[in-house]
Amino acid sequence: MNGKSGAEALEQASMDLQTIDKNGLPGKNKVWCLQFMLIPKLLWPLLLYEISTSTVESTEAKINRFTRKWQGFSPELTDDILLQSKAETSPDVNS
C-alpha cells in the first residue's frame, strides 16, 4: 500500500478479501490471514489518512460478511447475537 490514499488502501483491502476467499484454505486459515496479515496492513492507513466513517463502515461490513462465511455462520446472524454474554442467552432455571 505504498503511496496510496486511505480510500485506495481500503479498496485494495476489498480486493485482498476476495483473494483470500478464492484460495483453497479452510475457513479458519482464511480468518487467520485476515487477522494477522490483512488487518495489520490496514491499520497504518486508517491512522494516517482521514477516511470517511461511511467508507470504514463499508469495509468493516465486508470483513464481517467474509468472516461469517469462512466460519460457517448464517449471513443473517447479527453482531448483537455474537456479542451477547452467556448469562443473557441462558434460560432462567429458577422460573
Image: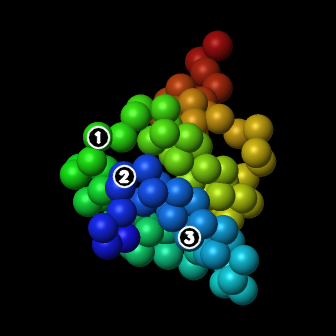
Q: Amino acid at mark 1?
A: Glu
Q: Residues within 10 Å of mark 1 (few under 14, many from 20)?
A: few
- Residue at left 31%, top 50%? 46
Q: Amino acid at mark 2?
A: Gly
Q: Give residue 8's quadrant in the image.
A: bottom left
Residue at the disc numbered 2: 6
Q: Give residue 19's quadrant in the image.
A: bottom right
In the image, is residue 19 above or below residue 46? below
Residue at the disc numbered 3: 16
- Residue at left 41%, top 74%? 37
Ranked by sequence position, the earlier of labels 2 and 1 is 2
Q: x, y percentage for residue 63?
A: 56, 53
Cα gap from disc 2 to disc 1, whole angstroms? 7 Å
Image quarter of the C terminus: top right
Q: x, y percentage for residue 47?
A: 23, 50
Mark 1, secondary structure of its residue = loop
**Circle 3 or circle 1, nearest the eye:** 1
Q: x, y percentage for residue 66?
A: 65, 58
Numbered tag placed on residue 50 in the rendering: 1
